[in-house]
Amino acid sequence: METKKKDIRALTKEQLRQFFVEHGDKAFRGNQVYEWLWQKSAHTFDAMTNVSKETRQMLEENFVINHIRVDQMQRSSDGTIKNAVRLHDGLVVESVLIPTETRTTACVSSQVGCSLDCRFCATARMKRMRNLNPDEIYDQVVAIDNESRLYFDRPLSNIVFMGMGEPLMNYNNVLKAIEMITSPEGLGMSPRRITVSTSGVPKMIKKMADEEVKFRLAVSLHSAIDEVRTSIMPFNATFPLKDLREALEYWYSKTKNRITYEYVVWKGINDTREAVDALVKFCKFAPSKVNLIEYNPIDDGEFQQASMDAVEMYRSILESNGITVTVRRSRGKDIDAACGQLANKS
Ligand code: SAH
């Protein structure tokens, strides 16, 4: 009977060292292989050229490297790149490279599909199939770093967990991936250039605060009025604003990090003075930034971007209350790579 081979990147460095000792080799061999697996991002055991042929064979017999494969790459007229990424079990997720004058940002997925049910988001229409493993998240970053070097002559500079899925519902794997992305034994990126975006899972926000993580937090708020938020993000009924706010206060008290809010202004939903006042009241307790993001239509017009006047009203009221505001244009819309459009269409 064939036993199922283990994903070698599920092992810690210590476990890998242990494996070699148990197989009559030196612990140091584990360090070498670990370096190939993460820092050098080897796709095969055969690529590990400073490891003997017998050792590579032995690894082959015991393990697999579940490297992702970029199945399809699409380029937008604005430079944005979308990767359709195939996982070892055939499932597909998407990640996006967003170039600006000075930076390259990777937008990565944390789950296949999503278990939340935001009514304006295309990913919500795919049910959640599974969580991504740390190495599958890491590989998406590596793929985009390679593309950034190839097409823009510079390394990747920022990462946002704003692709498919809810990162805080795959908490352990997302944190493990970030650990490797920031480790000198991985990509050595600064955690300050990484943003985890959440729809708001209070318990997990508190847990992150307790673990004193160094990356940034963004919250997809869209409304600071429970009734309205529940109507567009039904899970808000389970995690109401009061609990979210309490968790964010805890986060701020521990990290002293500014909080970013993602916010779309829709016609007839939250384009009122009352909605802005509620937002100001919600986020005033800590230094905040509100990203007013453009709506990317995903359907027949149930949701519509509010007028420029409404967006301007938000901007001026927020600013007069000392809240930083950015009005963000969408990127990569022509290839369905913009916020909320990731749904494995092709
Ligand atoms: N689940 C996490 C990570 C996804 S981030 C979260 O909710 O934060 C994707 C971002 O795009 C979120 O801010 C989401 O609210 C926003 N979004 C979803 N659908 C959108 C759409 N059609 N147009 C613009 N933004 C959208």
Image (cartoon, helix red, strand yellow):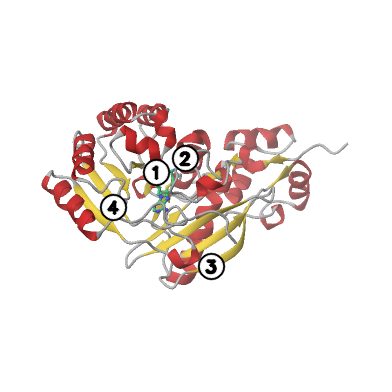
> Circle 1 — which element?
strand
Label 2 and label 4: CA atoms lie apart by: 21 Å
- In percent of width and height, residue 221 lies at 33, 41
Name the mark nearer the viewer: 1 or 4: 4
Q: Which residue does the numbered mark 3 point to in the structure image?
A: 74
Label 3 and label 1: CA atoms lie apart by: 24 Å
On screen, residue 275 versus residue 196, left or right, reads left
Q: Is residue 73 above or below residue 179?
A: below
Name the mark nearer the viewer: 2 or 4: 4
Label 3 and label 4: CA atoms lie apart by: 26 Å
Q: Amino acid at mark 1?
A: Ser
Task: Say which label, 3 or 4, has the lower sequence index.
Answer: 3
Q: Are marks 1 and 2 in contact (CB under 8 Å)?
A: yes
> Circle 3 — which element?
strand
319 and 233: which is toward the camera: 233
Q: Can the viewer see residue 289?
A: yes
Q: Can the viewer see residue 49?
A: no
Task: Say which label, 1 or 4, has the lower sequence index.
Answer: 1
Q: Which residue does the numbered mark 2 point to in the structure image?
A: 167
169 and 123: which is toward the camera: 123
Q: Are marks 2 and 3 in contact (CB under 8 Å)?
A: no
Q: Which residue does the numbered mark 1 point to in the structure image?
A: 197
Q: Is residue 111 above or below residue 316?
A: above
Report if the beta carbon of the residue with label 1 is closer than 8 angstroms to ligand 1: yes
Classify residue 229 by image quadrant: top left
Q: Residue at x 36, y 50 (%)?
A: 193
Q: Residue at x 60, y 49 (%)?
A: 37
Q: Which residue does the numbered mark 4 point to in the structure image?
A: 292
Report if the beta carbon of the residue with label 2 is closer than 8 angstroms to ligand 1: yes
> Circle 4 — which element?
strand
Which residue of the protein is positioned furthest toward the right in this rendering? 1
